[in-house]
Image (cartoon, coloured by chain):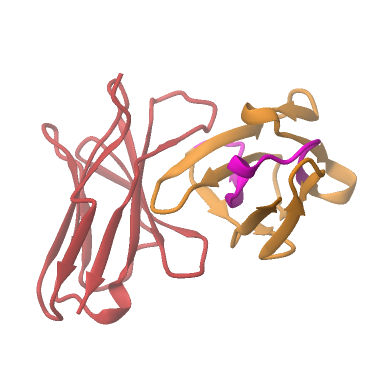
Amino acid sequence: NAGVMQNPRHLVRRRGQEARLRCSPMKGHSHVYWYRQLPEEGLKFMVYLQKENIIDESGMPKERFSAEFPKEGPSILRIQQVVRGDSAAYFCASSPEFSGNTIYFGEGSWLTVV
Amino acid sequence: AQSVTQLGSHVSVSEGALVLLRCNYSSSVPPYLFWYVQYPNQGLQLLLKYTSAATLVKGINGFEAEFKKSETSFHLTKPSAHMSDAAEYFCAVSDAGGGNKLTFGTGTQLKVEL
């Protein structure tokens, strides 16, 4: 049973480019969460999605960031016009509908903006 | 709003010594509490969780944590440290009302010395 799969694991983008991070949840999981970990900081919640719905995006920056979880395919976190401050590790997590609040994390995608 | 405070961003112990990592939480509703471990360049692995059952929770790798409502604490302990325990540890809280959204502490880096 594969875990939460994220790709790419490492991504380098120049300032102004777009970054797309993909997350495939564990089999049977219908809920996806994105977290960001800035250097020397803990993880910060960004967004919570179910299939085709954004449930909670209270942690998403107001501009340049978007997320989706389509009916088919992985969840995508998209960052437009990246800036150096976007350099961070982005973690995806997933859970089944009823999980007792346990979510399972992927191994992360490390974005470096140069 | 929920919050988590981890006292001590760096803790160093000798191999075989007691490990104690501190976590205090703030929550207006009964919380679910978690400890996660993160090895370098990897995702987060769940160590244990408290979900209002027994106050002493046993997790993987010999770790355990005790929920103390009067002290709003959920400290992580292990009787005897092993070199392989060196990692970063995160305490997290979520609203028992559901949604699985986690609020993380800033983490404690555990160093184990010979």
Residue shown at 81%/44% (left/top)? B17
Indicate yes or no whether the magenta region holds residue B92. Answer: yes
Q: Position of residue B41 (x, y in %)?
A: 39, 53
Left/right of residue B44 with respect to residue B105 in the rendered view:
left
Residue shown at 35%/50% (left/top)? A91
Pick whichever, A89 or B74, lies toward us: A89
Pick whichever, B90 or B4, lies toward us: B90
Q: Position of residue A61 (x, y in %)?
A: 32, 70
Q: Position of residue B39 (x, y in %)?
A: 48, 48
Looking at the rendering, which quadrant does residue B69 occupy?
Answer: top right
- Residue A100 vertical placement versus A76 (above, below): above
Q: Residue furthest front?
A: B114
Question: In the rendered image of this protein, which colour is used for chain A?
Answer: red
Residue shown at 85%/41% (left/top)? B68
Does the rendering let one see residue A79? no
Looking at the rendering, which quadrant does residue A109 occupy?
Answer: bottom left
- Residue B87 vertical placement versus B54 (above, below): below
Q: Which residues are magenta?
A: B74-98
Question: In the rendered image of this protein, which colour is used for chain B?
Answer: orange
Screen quadrant of the N terminus of chain B: bottom right
Pick whichever, B60 or B96, lies toward us: B60
Residue shown at 27%/80% (left/top)? A84
